[in-house]
Image (spheres, coloured by chain):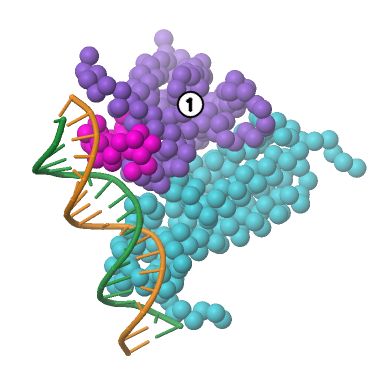
Chain colours: A purple, B cyan, C green, D orange
Amino acid sequence: MSQSTGGTRERIKAVALELFTEQGYEATSLREVAERLGVTKAALYYHFKSKDEIVSSVVEDRLERMDALIAWAESQPATLATRRAVIERYADAMFSGEQPSVMRFFEQNQTALKSLSAGRELRGRMFRLAAAVCQGDDSPGAQLRAVLALFAVHSSWFAVRTPEITDAERKRVALEVADELLAAIAAPPARP
Amino acid sequence: MSQSTGGTRERIKAVALELFTEQGYEATSLREVAERLGVTKAALYYHFKSKDEIVSSVVEDRLERMDALIAWAESQPATLATRRAVIERYADAMFSGEQPSVMRFFEQNQTALKSLSAGRELRGRMFRLAAAVCQGDDSPGAQLRAVLALFAVHSSWFAVRTPEITDAERKRVALEVADELLAAIAAPPARP
DNA sequence: ACCTGAACACCGTTCAAGT
DNA sequence: ACCTGAACACCGTTCAAGT
């Protein structure tokens, strides 16, 4: 509908995501992005308000997915089954569609993301999701286990150095380790 | 001995570490560092070859500690007791002396560190240490658990949001969770 | 040995101007 | 609506020059 900007806006997003992931956000200049598109640096500012805002648009989908997941997680009972389901859905989201590239970008640019609005939003969502995962047990141990269970999904992308391992295998092992961590979070007494 | 540079070099390191941690490496300009010291930007280049090299000098101690720990870890038998001892020593190093500030810098600047020589060195050491921790079991699950055990130490700094928790408590809970993860790494058959 | 002043190429951003 | 050219203040780095 409001897609009046032809394809240029999408092409900028794609090229920026690629370069930001390869070289890092700060290390990639808008001149490079513009050159790759055969366009002038100033042209980018017709489509985006700032460099920061290019990242926001890339990360948008992911933020929405996380919001949906958080809402769902918070609506479920605080049981082990819920915790496992949340992590599994998270892993599904991370390993599916075009999210893996966004994911690699995220891993590469954690620090830069801190000073970007989109980055702070993402970080906030991670903490809310972790809180939802350890819902019903707010002990330090539970908080740490919840965060590490989410990290297990992320880490499986780079921590496992076995050659020729498939994405499916990475996911399986991530969930296996996450499950162990979650099992040590206490479930509150069942409510009548 | 070769400490001919009075105290300026050390003052630069201290101020840079502080600002880099607060605002991030890329977001901190050398002008800010210089101004804080009442000195000109160019003066910094008398003491350091580049901005990058300021970080290297800050991270130097830590690299040496990690080298020592890796060497020790690799010389020990591949038992659960060793894995636990490595993580415990790692935690001790992270929680002691002036390392906590370097640690926070490290957490804040993971991405920037990737394009810095010092950062790549640190990352390399982390992987070697993880490999040493899961020595004797190179399955994907073991690799992931080893990395997460190290992460547990790091994460305890920010993942646990309980107010008024002490550093000692953070360390205790980190080691508790790490121990669980390590227990699931297989020990090779004992050698005669 | 220690530091300054001035210059360098590059950065993100703005804006009047063109089609 | 879409893009350019030229300018802005700022960045990291260099270097001749001062003490």
Left or right of D9 in this view: A100: right
Front position in the image: B95 or D11: D11
As drawn, A153 above or below C17: above
Main secondary-structure element of the magenta-colored stretch: helix
Identify the amino acid type marked 1. Pro
Front position in the image: A191 or D15: D15
Task: From the top left corner, tell me how far across and down residue A64 is, in percent.
Answer: 34, 22
Q: Which residues are magenta?
A: A31-57
In the picture of the structure, the residue carrying the numbered disc 1 is A100
Residue drawn at the location 41% of the way across and 38% of the way down: A20
Q: Split into 4 quadrants, where in the image is the C terminus of chain B?
A: top right
Task: From the top left corner, tell me how far across and down residue A127 is, in percent.
Answer: 39, 32
Residue drawn at the location 38% of the way across and 21% of the way down: A65
Residue drawn at the location 42% of the way across and 15% of the way down: A77
Q: Split into 4 quadrants, where in the image is the N terminus of chain B?
A: bottom right
Q: Is residue B115 magenta?
A: no
- Residue B170 at least partly seen: no
